[in-house]
Image: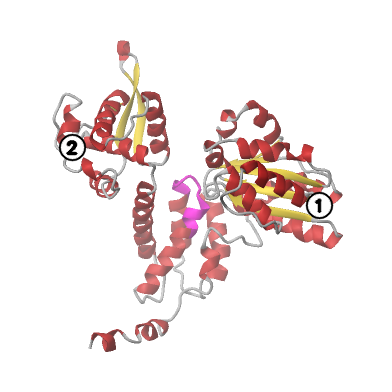
């Protein structure tokens, strides 16, 4: 009986009038043929890379800017144009994109590059020096220029800067091929933490991508909507509202596109023939909830411990770093985890603040000096429910009172 009821469930769904013409163009991974309000940055990058078309090695480039400001899209767009033009001129020029947040070790990056040039290298098992030597020998078999785009380069360097150092000095070991690096980072201070031997080579040229304002975001959304949605399915107020929400999120075009796409999905699922402002507001709530859940779930274990320490101190509105650290030390005892130094915990607190999970501010205590006050920016219940799904931290369930007593008081959670 149940089988007959459930059979053919897709037939009815396919009968619903579609809202989307091409949903893929509304995703941040799509690189359009036109990038509004980034003409200056595109021209600057093209001016740097045009050396490749003359047979010379382009300068290395560092691209900075907040999330959703078009950094990756512009780099990919210029790279695609460079490859097309070089093919027309009979020159060999390759542009390779690597996300340093995904392929994040020296071995994996070099092995990945070698595979792209048809060298059979295992993803594990070889000494790194051997993989590096095979990669050099393979690309140096002919004259060519290789541009490597390292997206989220700051995440890559956090795990070690050896790969960056080796890629930057590889040209001295090559006779025919030449390599240039384009680094992309959301962290404007990233270069300050580099080893001096890397810093001098990497940042030969720097490009800054400013956030979009609401008007610019509206232009971007209008262009994508024209090819992504069917005609007459968007309420005129949808694009301005999506742009306004995203402009408040530091001018994030990805956020604006996600809002518009999810609003369309919600309208389509509800069987509505028009995407309205109400769908956008519902999309805003859904995206925020999904984002927080994803961020919390993927946090490293030590960051989860620090966050739980902030949460477990209960109703006290503002905590000092020292109070959080004492609660953290108790968490480590309960879970059997190795405790980090207070300085490292302070760094993790700053990272959680940057993610928007907690809020910190410097408070002036008069003759007692200044201190950092810390509070949660998201609901306690959400933090608790997600963190306690980590099997290593499950033992913390029900331990909130002992944690509070480490601070000398008992508060209600």
> What residue does disc 1 label?
141
Is residue 37 shown to the viewer in this render? no
Residue 272 percent across, percent down from the top left: 37, 75
| Up/down of 75 relative to 370, above or below | below
Residue 159 percent across, percent down from the top left: 52, 38
Residue nearest the observer in this picture, 211 or 338: 338
Q: Residue at x 66, y 35 (%)?
A: 165
Magenta highlight range: 247-257
Callout 2: few (<14), some (14-19), or many (20+) C-alpha neighbours within 10 Å? many
| Up/down of 5 relative to 113, above or below | below
Q: Say left or right for 235 vs 108.
A: left
Q: Quadrant of the C terminus?
A: top left
Residue nearest the observer in this picture, 275 or 344: 344
Q: Residue at x 65, y 30 (%)?
A: 199
Residue nearest the observer in this picture, 115 or 25: 115
Q: Secondary structure at mark 1?
A: loop
Picture quadrant where residue 5 is located? bottom left
> What residue does disc 2 label?
400
Q: Quadrant of the N terminus?
A: bottom left
Residue 274 percent across, percent down from the top left: 41, 73
| Up/down of 390 relative to 346, above or below | below
């Amino acid at each position: 009986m149940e089988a007959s009821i459930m059979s053919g469930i897709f037939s009815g769904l396919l009968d619903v009038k579609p809202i989307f013409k091409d949903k893929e163009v509304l995703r941040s991974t799509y690189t359009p043929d036109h990038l509004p309000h980034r003409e200056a940055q595109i021209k600057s990058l093209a001016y740097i890379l045009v050396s490749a078309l003359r047979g010379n090695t382009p300068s290395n480039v560092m691209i900075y800017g907040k999330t959703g400001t078009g950094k990756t899209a512009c780099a990919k767009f210029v790279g695609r144009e460079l490859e097309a033009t070089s093919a027309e001129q009979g020159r060999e020029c390759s542009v390779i994109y690597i996300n340093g947040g995904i392929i994040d070790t020296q071995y994996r990056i070099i092995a990945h590059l070698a595979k792209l040039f048809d060298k059979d290298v295992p993803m594990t098992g070889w000494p790194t020096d051997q993989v590096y030597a095979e990669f050099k020998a393979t690309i140096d078999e002919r004259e060519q220029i290789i541009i490597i785009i390292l997206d989220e380069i700051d995440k890559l360097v956090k795990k070690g800067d050896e790969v960056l150092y080796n890629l930057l000095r590889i040209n001295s070991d090559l006779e025919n091929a030449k390599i240039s690096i384009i680094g992309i980072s959301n962290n404007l201070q990233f270069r300050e933490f580099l080893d001096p031997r890397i810093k001098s080579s990497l940042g030969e040229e720097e490009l800054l991508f400013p956030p979009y304002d609401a008007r610019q975001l509206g232009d971007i959304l209008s262009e994508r909507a024209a090819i992504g949605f069917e005609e007459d399915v968007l309420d005129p107020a949808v694009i301005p509202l999506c742009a306004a929400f995203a402009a408040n999120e530091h001018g994030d075009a990805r956020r604006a596109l996600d809002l518009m796409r999810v609003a369309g999905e919600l309208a389509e699922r509800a069987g509505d023939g028009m995407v309205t402002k109400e769908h956008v507001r519902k999309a805003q709530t859904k995206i925020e909830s999904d984002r927080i859940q994803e961020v919390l779930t993927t946090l490293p274990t030590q960051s989860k411990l620090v966050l739980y320490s902030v949460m477990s101190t209960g109703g006290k509105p503002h905590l000092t770093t020292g109070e959080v650290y004492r609660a953290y030390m108790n968490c480590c005892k309960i879970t059997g985890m190795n405790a980090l130094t207070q300085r490292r915990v302070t760094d993790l607190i700053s990272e959680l603040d940057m993610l928007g999970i907690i809020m910190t501010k410097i408070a002036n205590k008069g003759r007692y000096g200044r201190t950092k006050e810390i509070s949660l920016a998201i609901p306690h219940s959400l933090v608790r429910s997600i963190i306690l799904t980590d099997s290593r931290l499950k033992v913390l369930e029900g331990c909130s009172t002992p944690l509070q007593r480490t601070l000398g008081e008992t508060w209600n959670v």
